[in-house]
Image (cartoon, grey):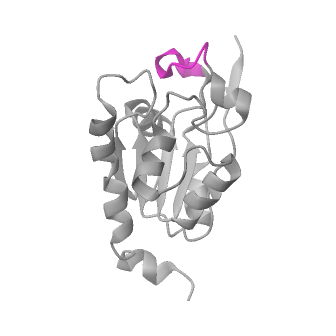
């Protein structure tokens, strides 16, 4: 059984929200891009909420995420998984990404948004944080998560806009370099 390996995080200093998926799917791995499957709603949601054109070059989309103070990564650094379904991730094979290290390097991250239940469950099982930022559980943008229509997912993902529209929390503002 083959091992799938995640990509490096898309994150810059000053990021406020870390969006965590589980592990890139087959199409994403082949294209070396987060959420590359054409039926995955992630980039369509980013286009609708933040005016990041989903058909723009990948590097441009990633740059725009960072300008908006959004970071993107996966809970799993690597795992054995036949296909792309999160339910097929072999639990014993999971090696988690160093999310605590990322949060130390970017202390301005005040919220972790999980792209689906699988990411949240993997995080809960494999990541131990001393101080936990606020979390948001958002519906998976995966085409396999078809129990909600796009509009329903979008409505819940609008929480990111709300979070970003609020001033940085006083705790994080005090910790940030002037």
Taking the spot 47% from the left edge, 33% from the top edge, the residue there is 122
Q: Horizontal placement of 102 versus 161: left or right?
A: right
Look at the image and tell me whether residue 29 can be seen.
yes
Q: Horizontal placement of 95 versus 160: left or right?
A: right
Q: Is residue 124 above or below residue 17?
A: above
Q: Is residue 158 above or below residue 20?
A: below
Locate residue 14: give its quadrant.
bottom right
The magenta span reads: 81-92
Taking the spot 67% from the left edge, 38% from the top edge, the residue there is 33
Taking the spot 42% from the left edge, 43% from the top edge, the residue there is 114
Residue 86: x and y, percent? Answer: 49, 22
Taking the spot 49% from the left edge, 54% from the top edge, the residue there is 18
Residue 109: x and y, percent? Answer: 48, 64
Residue 175: x and y, percent? Answer: 49, 79
Look at the image and tell me whether residue 79 can be seen.
no
Locate residue 37: give its quadrant.
top right
Foreground of the two, 126 or 121: 121
Locate residue 1: give its quadrant.
top right
Q: Quadrant of the C terminus?
A: bottom right
Q: Is residue 123 above or below residue 177?
A: above
């Amino acid at each position: 059984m083959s091992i799938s390996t995640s990509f490096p995080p898309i994150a810059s200093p000053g990021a406020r929200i870390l969006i965590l998926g589980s592990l890139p799917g087959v199409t994403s791995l082949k294209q070396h891009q987060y959420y590359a499957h054409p039926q995955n709603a992630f980039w369509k949601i980013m286009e609708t909420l933040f005016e990041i054109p989903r058909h723009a070059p990948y590097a441009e989309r990633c740059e725009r995420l960072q300008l908006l103070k959004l970071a993107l990564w996966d809970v799993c650094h690597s795992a054995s998984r036949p296909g792309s379904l999160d339910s097929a991730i072999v639990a014993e094979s999971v090696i988690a990404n160093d999310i605590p290290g990322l949060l130390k390097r970017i202390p301005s991250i005040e919220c972790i948004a999980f792209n689906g239940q699988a990411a949240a469950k993997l995080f809960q099982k494999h990541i131990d944080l001393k101080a936990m930022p606020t979390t948001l559980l958002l519906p998976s943008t995966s085409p396999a998560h078809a129990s909600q229509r796009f509009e329903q997912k979008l409505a819940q993902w609008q929480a990111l806009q709300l979070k970003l529209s609020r001033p940085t929390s006083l705790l994080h503002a005090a910790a940030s370099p002037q």
